Amino acid sequence: MLSSTEENYLKAIYKISERDNKAASTNAISSEMSTSAASVSDMLQRLSSKGMTHYEKYKGVTLTEQGNRIATNLIRKHRLWEVFLVEKLNFTWDEVHDMAEQLEHIQSPDLVNRLDQFLEYPKFDPHGDPIPDADGNFTHRRQIELTNLTTKESGTLVGVQEDSSTFLKYLDQMGLSLGTELKVLEKFEFDGSVKLLVNNKEQITISNKVCKNLFVKK
Amino acid sequence: MLSSTEENYLKAIYKISERDNKAASTNAISSEMSTSAASVSDMLQRLSSKGMTHYEKYKGVTLTEQGNRIATNLIRKHRLWEVFLVEKLNFTWDEVHDMAEQLEHIQSPDLVNRLDQFLEYPKFDPHGDPIPDADGNFTHRRQIELTNLTTKESGTLVGVQEDSSTFLKYLDQMGLSLGTELKVLEKFEFDGSVKLLVNNKEQITISNKVCKNLFVKK
DNA sequence: TAATAAATTTAGACTAATCTAAAAATAGAA
DNA sequence: TTCTATTTTTAGATTAGTCTAAATTTATTA
């Protein structure tokens, strides 16, 4: 059985490997987790001795099959708890991250599957992220970054990359939530900002940085 | 903010003080928590320096108002999660203790109250134990030990003192659950065992030890 | 390719929570 | 009331996870 701390390392390694498509470096992990590189280096050796990672000094780490299974299950638990908090307890999508961060570490052979059933097997969490099933399989959705829509193209907002509270609250203020219909009216070369038509009504302009954090489905 | 460990000490102190109606001794706590007396002694000083307990060396501890508030809230969280696990996720009453032990330590200003609302403000947990409200007030119920019923008296099973899985499974096997109607047919002086009529149908005999762990309402 | 910069690991130290063994204080009994 | 048994506390050590500073390895660039 792993400690919560060890589990969090596996999650970070998973996330980085997914993003960069290569072994996670000590520095990447230390920055992801806001800990010192020294602590990470220490931990990587421990996780390897427990069979969770493939680790070669100075070469970064990848997850073993077992490590991958645990990381995926953490993500499953995290996202299902988020659905519970939003759907059943009426929290908003910007409030649930910290609670889910704690709830994902609850140890129980059955809890997560019962929760999944109770929630009627949701495929996506409140931020549009896919929820792996009990076997670790993700539902894949053909989604693209909003930046990739050309002028006059339309799409539905189906996910966000960032899930910081500040970003999500900003989206709320702009009237953007999952399911919102967007049409690109104009793209400004100068700074990459984009003027959008929201649900065929409002017009807003958002920065390039915001655009990059929004996923749409054509 | 207290650690989970510190919180568990407060709960133990609360439980012992309730039971014995006096300051909790180091030994009582160490036996309740299955840790060494030395560890307890250490922790008591720490909890006192944090304003959670009144502690005088060699004299035992009591909770301060703040300590009491935290302990009561832990009990609230524990019991509400148990209701959730049984009512919503269909766990049985003997399966939920360990999960609730973990869930009670989730830190969130609002979660427990949202959960309470979602569950429609239950007053008792799946073992018949009262759930304190947000202000720490318990609903009191006039319940007595089954041992206190005399021959031919009847009552409804409303609570259990023990909540170990083995004990609860034993009750299931004997056909006993909360709400069951019991009538005392015969009390055996010899060993204190009791013959009962269950729901006006079955007859069973249970030991004195089991009797002492059952609460009924006349 | 040699020098320098960046990344990584090791060394040594700290805190929280635990333990065993020994010392000190309190309680009980003769 | 004095001696002995019990309870409690202190001392010193251990483990997980963390840190900073120093040493080492890898990468970059002149």
Image (cartoon, coloured by chain):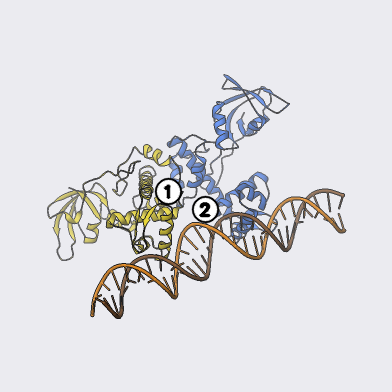
Chain colours: A yellow, B blue, C brown, D orange
Residue sitting at the far left: A152
Chain of residue at mark 1 = A
Chain hosting mark 2:
B
Name the element at disc 1: helix
Q: Is residue A200 left or right of residue B63?
A: left
Number of marks drawn: 2
| Residue shown at 32% from the left, 47% from the top | A126
Image x and y of residue B68, in percent: 58, 51
Closest to the observer: B180 or B100?
B100
**Residue B135 makes an appearance in the image:** no
Mark 2 on the same chain as mark 1? no
Residue C24 in percent (x, y) is at 73, 63
Mark 2 Cα-neighbour bin, 10 Å: few <14, some 14–19, many ≥20: some
B89 vs C6, left or right, is right
Q: Which residue is mark 1?
A: A103
Residue A118 figure quarter: top left
Q: Which residue is mark 2?
A: B4
> Image height check: is B136 above or below D21?
above
Residue name at image x 34 percent, y 41 percent: A135
User: Which quarter of the image is occupied by the C terminus of chain B?
Assistant: top right
Amino acid type, mark 1? Leu
Q: Is residue B47 visible?
A: yes
Image point (37%, 37%), residue name:
A117
SS category of the residue bearing label 2:
helix
> Which is nearer the eye, D25 or C6?
D25
Q: Position of residue A8 (x, y in %)?
A: 40, 54
Q: What residue type is disc 2 on?
A: Ser
Q: Residue at x 12, y 55 (%)?
A: A151
Q: CA distance from mark 2 to mark 1?
A: 14 Å
